[in-house]
Image (spheres, rainbow, N blue to C red):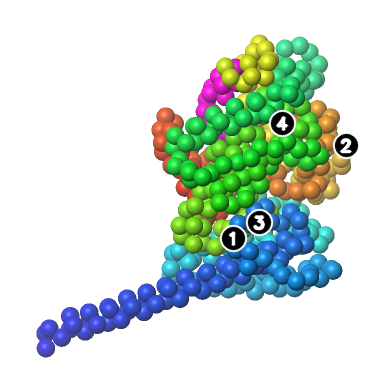
Amino acid sequence: MRSLLPCLLIVIFNSCSQSTEKKTSSLNTNINELATSYIKLGLSIGAYDPDFVDAYYGPDSLKPVGNKNAVFPKDSFLLAIRSLKNQFDNIENNDSVAFSRARWISAQLTAFERRVKIFSGEFGDFDKESQELFGATATVFKEGFFESELKKLDSVLPGSGAVSERFQLLANKFIIPEARIDTVFKAAIAEAKRKTGNYFALPSNEDFRLEYVNDKPWSGYNWYKGNYQSLIQINKDLNIFVDRAIDVGSHESYPGHHVYNMLLEKDLYRNKGYIEISLYPLFSPQSLIAEGTANYGIDMAFPGIEKERFTKEVLLPLAGLDTSGLSLYYRALSIRQNLNFVRNEVARGLINNTMNEAEAMRWLKTYSLYNEETAKKSISFIMKNRSYVINYNYGLQLVRDYIEKGLNPSDENEKWNRFKVILSSQVLPADLQK
Ligand SMILES: [Zn+2]
């Protein structure tokens, strides 16, 4: 009789474990089916909204077929989004993989809902839109903050007059001549790739194509094509300053967007079969992670004085430019970094109708140190993309704080390890704030 109890326990344990296994496998099947519905829904919305899908490299069979309605079916999209989101939200925390996938897709669907509303002319205020689209609300900065940052710049720039004019005068020494732009960009990207390759094993067939374009509201863009290939476009509408070759180059390529998309495709889509990763919806929490990491990646590839050294020794000679004034220029640029949040306040003002365009131009010219044409370009970006601007600066801040928390600054390996975790997992902006 005494031996019966352990036997009974073994029988119960086995049946329990079989039932858990069964439950887990049905949950996985269920999440894959739901994730497929998520892709189909996203691609259907993208058939109307040309900015909705930033990248898709999954099966063609999930793309919508047949003629679309003449009118954007806002209400039926909203119903479909809510119903699908409910199903993801009902997946309980009894399987960590299915649950974390469901949680990530659910946050993406919150963004779908807000974007469908925006696309059909139903707007929210700046913070509400950014929270729903990108999963974050950016810190508010008053004008006084920018005034005091500007004073720091005032004290290092020579001459008298408006700080922005003195800054422009210095910056204009470092405009890359048109004929040298391609050479300079290729050199900057090659160096960023070399640095990234020291820490990440990149797919052997990975590659990118570089193209120069005009009439765009952005300075550069990565169009990820799948199978580890990117098309990188650089906008030549405005003068390109030498430091921008490093910033835009590594932001779009290594270890920026090209690497981010490749690691997601390799680690999650191909190795683990997470179908949802094959769709990258532009207006979603994924973009805060993408822009934040792409901006942080510039400093990963060119840490400390590396950027200035590389500019002086490699890029300026390639551009045929003189190196005098370069240290001062980089010092001014580092102070100007704190002025990046100006764009949020301008966007907040324009979206919330608390700032008119003339006032927005004044803020951008005074505090962002933009010239007339760059300020206009910035406003056209904001009018098109609304609260998207927070992804660049607030996204950068969240990524930086997360990676550098408790980090030994000289431990480069650990820094790249933490960076890779963000680049190759389903991280939400809220996870970076824990
Ligand atoms: Zn970007």
Residue furthest out toward the bottom: 1
In the rendered structure, the answer to whether residue 4 lies left or right of residue 35 reads left
Mark 3, mark 4: which one is toward the viewer? 3
Dot in front, 4 or 1:
1
Badge 3 or badge 1: first in the primary sequence? 1
State which mark lies toward you, 2 or 1.
Answer: 1
SS for dot 1: loop
Q: Which residues are magenta?
A: 297-312
Task: Quote the CA–CA distance across marks 2 and 1.
Answer: 45 Å
136 horizontally vs 203: left or right: right
Q: Quadrant of the N terminus?
A: bottom left
Which residue is identified by label 2? 358
Between 186 and 403, the residue placed more toward the observer is 186
Amino acid type shown at disc 4: Phe
Which residue in the protein does label 1 denote? 58
What residue is drawn where x is 76% and y is 49%? 386
Identified by mark 1, the residue type is Gly
* Residue 192 in view: yes
| Residue type indicated by callout 2 | Ala
Verify CB contact (< 8 Å) between mark 2 and mark 1. Answer: no
Q: Give SS at disc 3.
A: strand
Q: Pick whichever, 396 or 142, lies toward us.
A: 396
Q: Residue furthest front?
A: 205
